[in-house]
Image (cartoon, coloured by chain):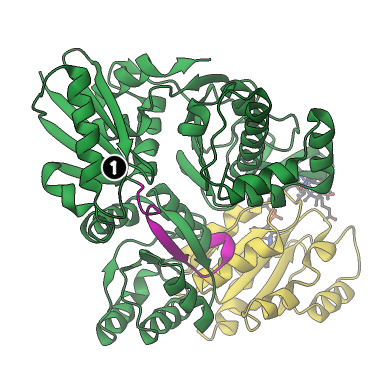
Amino acid sequence: MSRYLTIDIGSTFTKLVAVDSEKEDIIATSSSFTTVATDVTIGYKKALEKLYDSLGEKIKFDKIISCSSAAGGLKMCAIGLVPELTVEAAKRVCLGAGARVDLVLSNHINRSEVEEIKEKKIDIILLAGGTDGGNSECVIYNANKLGEAGISIPVIYAGNKSAKDDIEDIFKKYGMNGYFVENVMPEINKLNIPSAREKIREIFLKNIIEAKGIKSIENEIDKVILPTPESVLRACDLLSKGYMHEDGLGEIVCLDIGGATTDMYSMSSPSAKRMDVVLKGLEEPYAKRTVEGDLGMRYSATGVLKALSEEEIRLIDEEFDIDLAKELNFRNEHVDCVFEDDAKEALIETIIGGICVDKAMYRHVGKLEEIFSQMGLIYNQTGKDLTQIKYVIGTGGVLIHAHNPTQILEKVKGNNPLVLRPRNPKYLLDKDYILSSMGLISEIDPLLAIKILKKHLKEI
Amino acid sequence: MKTIVIGVIGADCHAVGNKIIDYVLREHGYNVVNVGVLSSQEDFINAAIESNASMILVSSLYGQGELDCRGMREKCVEAGIGDIKLYVGGNIVVGKQNFDEVKERFIKMGFDRVFAPNTPIEADLPFIKEDLGE
Ligand code: B12
């Protein structure tokens, strides 16, 4: 029998989940305010005490593992050559590693763009450009630009392998903090995620954790510190594919609406699902994550307003008799506001959550373009076909506490035949907030993690 | 090794010749980047930028080549690969038009070489060699 403790350090809450491998279940959960500004240990210790209280005893854990999105999470800058190709590949790798991509740069970068890297307090740069044997001029130019500007944060080189020696010289010349991984796009439209993702994770562990004050609890933790979104991605991947004799749920979508961002995860085969389409563009991964930095319930409420057309706003105002613009601006100015037991406010929260889901899914999902030929209608497909998704899972505070989560989740659907949204999914809710925790457990015991996931994700 | 981007432009889905061209060019020692059928001008150009290609070889079989190829040279110039060699071949226009006139029109559009229907790709090889300075 083994007992594991997982710690999820968020910007506002630190959440603990204790698991017993023999009972194949969660034995206790607790949470407490995070105090990243001062010392994360305080929040952790408080939560731990609460956990012991609910267990009725102090138990010793065989393993303690943690994930973190504290202090804004992992902030990355993706650099590539062509926007649709290496830039997009680099961006996808960052997102797949659980990062926030705060800056996306293409072609030859300029001084003000390099300044932005500093201003936005980027943690890691992923520098790509050129297929293997392809363009090396641009990526060499960009590496020099970073060097000249005295960039000292970690730079991961994930571009054309033929330029590696030159890049190595540049890193040396400017004394940069450089790392090398495989090309994120070795051939046109081929996406290569694992090598770069592992390096991001390694650097996150080594450098970033320390900088964000999370180091202080490190000696209490055994290992595996992941960015929280990557834990969620791992949990979803496991839940979708299954493990050994434990079946997975098949193709699923998971979404998390926060105050500042809306995260969308899809686990589905990227191959074409019908005969009349030709796949175009960069290859899609089975496990895909996108993050919308302008869609959220509080900090990004004004972004939600911008994402809507005037007509959409007017329709919502009329249907629900509200002033949506006013409500969104209020939330942006009062990011700490909470609405308790107020039916009207609950409705407005549901509407805003629904808009986030609708827009985030539209951006995440694949689309068809009609091509009229004498053989009839054929289609070019870019992105993933999610029409056959079986389950949509809601996680994160907003959905867990929503009065009517289904009303928010069902905004993933749509009936435009050219937009490949889920058509008829069932809805599951991560009520006990265990998704990120099970992503961590899957590192030690995948079978245990999937059993607990299947037990605790409730259909709504 | 020189890189050549190949593909079939526009709403054209004739796939067989494309596979043969891919095979023949590889056999003759070229690095081939194949963007496949139903490809836009941007698909060809983006692939050429990232792969540092020396040539884009456009196929058009279904008769709308002239429409589909318009403005391609200008886009290459805009994208910083203005010097790239542009070839086009297949059945590039509808029906039996005077090929010299057709050729003239495509040359005006900025194509370096224009091939008549039924020109097998093998016949193209000496030109590629010459134009790529081999
Ligand atoms: C098979 C075929 C089809 C199949 C294609 C299946 C597939 N997915 O591949 C289907 C039935 C789908 C089809 C549809 C159509 N087809 Co069709 N098709 C043919 C056919 C019979 C053979 C094509 C083929 O595979 N040839 C064998 C390969 C090896 O040769 P290739 O494609 O010509 O390629 C070689 C050369 O052209 C050259 N080459 C090609 N590109 C380049 C580029 C350069 C730079 C160089 C140097 C050389 C080069 O090298 C290649 C290899 O040797 C031809 C007639 C013919 N005999 O050519 C008509 C033909 C191409 N089709 C034609 C037409 C009109 C159509 C349709 C518009 C309508 C129709 N009549 O059915 C639709 C269009 C659909 C679309 N959106 O693309 C016409 C085009 C007429 C024109 N351009 O003026 C043709 C010529 C028939 C005809 N005589 O009317 N078609």
Q: Quadrant of the N terminus of chain A?
A: top left
Left or right relative to A61: residue A437: right
Residue B16: x %, y % from top left: 64, 49
Residue A180 seen by the camera: yes
**Residue at x-position 51% and y-position 60%:** A188
Residue A170: x %, y % from top left: 31, 83
Q: Secondary structure at mark 1?
A: strand
Where does the magenta region start and end?
A69-85
Q: Quadrant of residue A226?
A: top left
Residue A110 seen by the camera: no
Considering only vertical position in the picture, is A140 above or below A281? Answer: below
- The residue type indicated by label 1 comes to Cys
Considering only vertical position in the picture, is A415 above or below B90? Answer: above
Residue A45: x %, y % from top left: 19, 38
Q: Indicate if the residue with disc 1 has its beta carbon within 8 Å of ligand 1.
A: no
Magenta region includes residue A84 = yes
Query: What is the letter of the yellow chain?
Result: B
Considering only vertical position in the picture, is A270 above or below B66? Answer: above
| Residue wearing tag 1 | A67
**Residue at x-position 65% and y-position 54%:** B17
